[in-house]
Image (cartoon, rainbow, N blue to C red):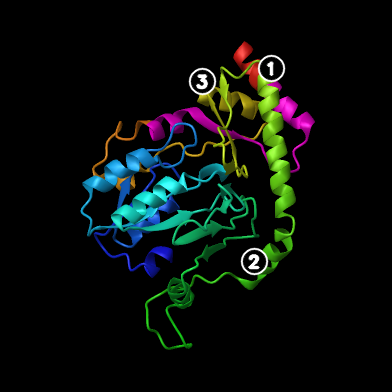
Amino acid sequence: ISLMSLDIKPDDIVITTPYSFFATAGVIVRLGAKPVFVDIEPNTYNLDPDKLEEVLKKQPKYKSKCIIPVHLYGQCADMDRISAQARKYNVKIIEDAAQSIGAKDKEKSSGTMGDMGCFSFFPSKNLGCFGDGGMVITNNENLAEKIKILRVHGSKPKYYHSLVGGNFRLDALQAAVLIVKLKYLADWTKKRQQNASTYNQLFEKNKLVGLVRVPFVSPENFHIYNQYIIRVQRRDELLKFLKEQDIGTEIYYPVPFHLQPCFSPLGYREGDFPEAEKASKETMAIPIYPELTVEQQEYVVMKIKEFYNR
């Protein structure tokens, strides 16, 4: 709906990361536009601003319409540098803040630094409803009004359609759930941050830092840890071992966009985005939910240590 509000049309170019949940790139293609990927930073896993400018220089200015930076795992991308390049090349920014509600970069909240910010309320998110849901925010009155019209099949008033929209309304029941849960979000975030700190200390205490790379946090970032991502050697073997110990794990994400079969017409090849490809083979998430106890975290770390001591 954000892309629709910008009148993104077939053959327009939308620039984004190759390393995110599929919807980030899928929505671009569904509108007939062309996704152009920019590799990620090796430490934050977010879109690399240095590589972004290289890509912007190569694209026809009249074709490049939008950048979608993703604030992955709960940490904001480098929005100062991304925004500067967007202004230079006259392109809009839609922040994919699906995993970063409450995160900040230099005291600026996730979703407020571009033209629009998009949030997900899927149950697995830090603030989740009972089903599917999401939110778009903007300080542009014209875009806000257009989005409100698009969300109800493009109608205003009812049954009179100035635009072709869709059913993008948040169900009232889901909204009610979110209103109740919102008051707990700050406490849940604090607990996730405490759990992350505990993990960091436990990995260091158990001399696993060389084998396990813990999340890097940019100095001026407020990380809300939608996931706690570690980078490890022999990742797939470790996943199998932890599963046998009844420890939940997940890979976010095993195949970058440019290597997905459905995007093969874009012409990308293996090796085009080396950092995204490496991350897809070396990273994994371990439990970070607010109710996690210190004892449970100690168990997770001890089992990881046991794996590498075998």
Image quadrant of residue 299? top right
Q: Are marks 2 and 3 in contact (CB under 8 Å)?
A: no
Residue 238 x/y as whole percent: 57, 23
**Dot 1: what SS?**
loop
* Residue shown at the point (49%, 56%) measured from the top left: 113
According to the image, label 1 marks what residue?
206
Query: Measured along the vertical axis of the image, is residue 64 above or below residue 277?
Result: below
- Mark 3, secondary structure of its residue: loop
Depth check: give the residue in front, 297 or 47: 47
Q: Is residue 58 left or right of residue 27?
A: left
Q: Where is residue 202 drawn, in percent x and y?
A: 70, 24
Q: CA distance from mark 3 to mark 1?
A: 16 Å
Name the residue tied to disc 3. 233
| Label 3 or label 1, whichever comes before in sequence order | 1
- Residue extent of the magenta highlight: 275-303
Amino acid at pointer 3? Gln
Residue 290 shown in magenta: yes
